[in-house]
């Protein structure tokens, strides 16, 4: 019932031309690890993910869609989606996701906010901005929240770009004691080494 009311509110305000914040807040915070692969979501511009918030819309974006054989979230222009409230302090967590871009100028900013509503925008803290390569293939990205000092429990995915980006396989979990290697490079490679 809550999801139906959410869709009716969104469609009513969207048809009137408002940029809105619409959501169906869940009764309890999400346990960790939290996983969303969008496979159980209804697709199309009039649908959204249960317990997520569409804080800023760009036309109908973002919304769940079918990309190839995978369901994912599609973003275009400047738009913001907020994940559900997490059950643990975010400073102990990380988010990982797969992202595919059609235009190299697109950026994804991962932020944190106390409550996913523009009336609380002053509590928004940007954690990391990722400029995305336009290759047409999914890349895995990971953002750690260990430097975050606030009390926010909502993670935002902000998209800013002139073309479509796709997000899939979103996972929020605890940061491991031993972090994954990043930026590994090899140099001075020869036939004897």
Image: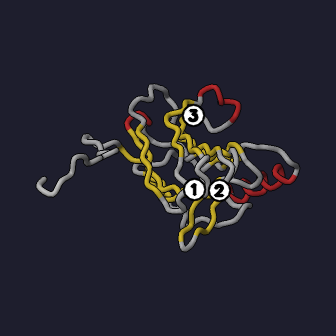
First in residue order: circle 1 vs circle 3: 1
- Residue 24 in the image: state x and y as whole percent: 65, 50
Going by the image, does 14 lie left or right of 47? right
- Is residue 121 depicted above or below 68 in this figure? above
Q: Residue furthest left?
A: 192
- Residue 165 in the image: state x and y as whole percent: 60, 55
Residue drawn at 49 percent across, 29 percent down: 151
Q: Which mark is residue 164?
A: 2
Could you say which is closer to the camera, residue 92 or residue 179?
179
First in residue order: circle 3 vs circle 2: 3
Going by the image, does 54 lie left or right of 90? right
Q: Residue furthest right?
A: 16
Q: Residue furthest front?
A: 191
Residue drawn at 68 percent across, 55 percent down: 2
Q: Which mark is residue 101?
A: 1
- Is residue 47 depicted above or below 116 in this figure? below
Secondary structure type for disc 2:
loop
Q: Residues within 10 Å of mark 2 (few under 14, many from 20)?
A: some
Q: Quadrant of residue 164?
A: bottom right
- Is residue 121 depicted above or below 98 in this figure? above
Q: What whole-number distance in Å separates the C-alpha atoms at marks 1 and 2?
A: 6 Å
Callout 1 touching callout 2 (CB < 8 Å): yes
Residue drawn at 51 percent across, 55 percent down: 99
Q: Residues within 10 Å of mark 1 (few under 14, many from 20)?
A: many
């Amino acid at each position: 019932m809550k999801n139906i009311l959410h869709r009716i509110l969104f469609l009513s305000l969207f048809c009137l031309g408002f940029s809105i914040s619409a959501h169906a807040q869940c009764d309890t915070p999400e346990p960790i690890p939290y996983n969303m692969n969008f496979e159980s979501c209804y697709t199309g511009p009039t649908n959204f993910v249960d317990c997520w918030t569409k804080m800023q819309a760009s036309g109908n974006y973002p919304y769940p869609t079918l990309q190839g054989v995978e369901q994912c979230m599609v973003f275009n222009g400047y738009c913001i989606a907020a994940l559900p409230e997490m059950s643990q302090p975010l400073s102990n967590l990380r988010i990982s996701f797969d992202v595919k871009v059609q235009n190299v100028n697109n950026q994804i900013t991962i932020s944190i906010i106390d409550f996913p509503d523009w009336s609380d925008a002053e509590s928004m803290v940007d954690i990391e901005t990722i400029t995305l390569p336009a290759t047409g293939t999914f890349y895995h990205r990971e953002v750690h929240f260990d430097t975050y000092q606030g009390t926010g429990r909502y993670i935002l995915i902000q998209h800013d770009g002139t073309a479509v980006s796709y997000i899939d396989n979103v996972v929020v979990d605890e940061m491991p004691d031993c972090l994954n290697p990043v930026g590994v490079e090899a140099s001075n490679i020869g036939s004897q080494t």
